[in-house]
Amino acid sequence: MTDAQKYITAVQEKLAQKGAWEQEFLQAVQEFLPTIVPFLEEHPEYIEKDIVSLLVEPERIIQFRVPWQDDEGKRQVNRGYRVQFNSALGPYKGGLRLHPSVNLSILKFLGFEQVFKNSLTDLGIGGGKGGSDFDPKGKSDDEIMRFCQSFMTELARHIGPSLDVPAGDIGVGGREIGFLFGMYKRLQQYDAGVLTGKPLNFGGSLIRTEATGYGLVYFVKHLLADQGTTLKGKKVILSGSGNVSIYAIEKLIELGAIPLTCSDSNGCIYDPAGIDLALLKEIKEVKRERLTSYQAARPEAQYMEGSVWDQDIAADIALPCATQNEINGTQAQNFINHGVKLVAEGANMPSSNEAIALYLANDVYYGPAKAANAGGVAVSALEMSQNAQRLSWSREEVDHRLDDIMENIFLTCRNTAERYGLKNNYVAGANIASFEKVAHAMLLQGLV
Ligand code: GLU
């Protein structure tokens, strides 16, 4: 073992001893650290200063109770969190997730990923994440509002436009951001820059809702262009039916690809003629219904229970856009056997480490989440710029900037991988390039 390998193994072991139950966080660290060994070997100063031990420790974690009353007048309580992971490059930035699975391990993994993702955008943002184990499913608008108001009553004192700027994630969209914003301004003062993903009529940015999905497809477009091909006619299997999946489908159709699938937590749709986007939007965005309604309206499509990754569908590209660990090794092998040559991640950590190893072993082009889905947070940073300027940019301007940012991120991954003799290994490229950006800033700021 080289010095660098010994060093990262020791850091990982120490971390596992401190919190063996933090499975998702340990998984994210385990995916990341081995890939930066080639960089550490060239730069022993980062080992001497023990920067990696600092990097795996959040700067601050805030945990609080969130009491609220349901529509029957019954008292409820949930756990709220904000993990302020790293501010070496700018104010903490990252979403809030509302989902019953939320715990500190999940928020630490998301915060850790966010730090590096955000650095790849080159827009001067640190990384954080927050949320609650509150389950928005089946709740009325008023219940959502009361929960958001209570959540912000505590969170407001910890955030600010130059300190920490939350946004959406699973379970948090424009409606929730609106309620959170309304409460923030009552408690502090009006400042549009304190949250991103706002509705358009009070400081939101055009394209923010679409940004993660569009950005994901732009990343794939630039990767394919680098290989001398395009999206035209490519068959794409996707998971999820939230804003990432919906707007990835929209951009795929625009660029001539054929999106075949989407999914929710119960099952998936396979539409051999290509997903009907208008129908999908109506079901998910207007009616907020389950995907069984899609099949009811379009009998030629198939609805199948279970994961989309277990199905027998031939495709060229896979875009997981649902949630963490949705693809295990068996499922990765299944779609590789069905022809998939490119995987790009719209969700955060959707592939298990076993699945990632299979992509690399089978020469599948792999765009990891922190690069491929950075378009969402990038447009959040553009929203912060517009709020600071008190201007709003046109759709075309934001979309054009997003495409440029995704091209730069792709080129950073590609060139960094090549520079370390790891051609086409975009995960190593993304990890090394982002580590270098964050760790260098930390080195210059001293032991803080
Ligand atoms: N939750 C999104 C992500 O995973 C976006 C965060 C943001 O816009 O701040 O990157």
Image (cartoon, rainbow, N blue to C red):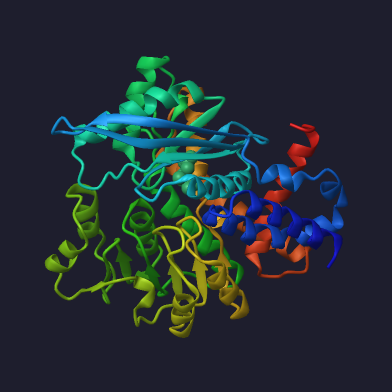
Number of marks in picture: 0
**Is residue 404 in sight in this rendering?**
no
- Please state which of residues 216 and 158 is positioned toward the viewer in this rendering: 158
Residue positioned most to the bottom = 337
Residue at left 33%, top 45%? 171
Q: Is residue 61 above or below residue 159?
A: below
Find residue 376 and report its horizontal and vertical position in percent. Answer: 47, 46
In the image: residue 80, left or right of residue 116: left
| Residue 67, placed above or below residue 324 | above
Q: Name the quadrant of the N terminus.
A: bottom right
Taking the spot 34% from the left edge, 71% from the top edge, the residue there is 307
Left or right for 136, reference 423: left
Q: Is residue 29 left or right of residue 172?
A: right
Between 429 and 394, which is closer to the camera in this rendering? 429
- Horizontally, residue 362 falls left or right of residue 174, namely right
Estimate the x, y position of residue 442 in percent, counting from the top left: 74, 38
Residue at 14 percent across and 73 percent down: it is 299
Name the residue at 86% across, 47% down. Answer: 48
Residues 63 and 302: in front is 63
Provide residue 183's location: percent of width, then percent of height: 34, 22
Residue 323 showing in the rendered view: yes
Foreground pick, 37 / 433: 37
Quick one: quadrant of the C terminus? top right
Rendered location of residue 164, percent (x, y): 53, 30
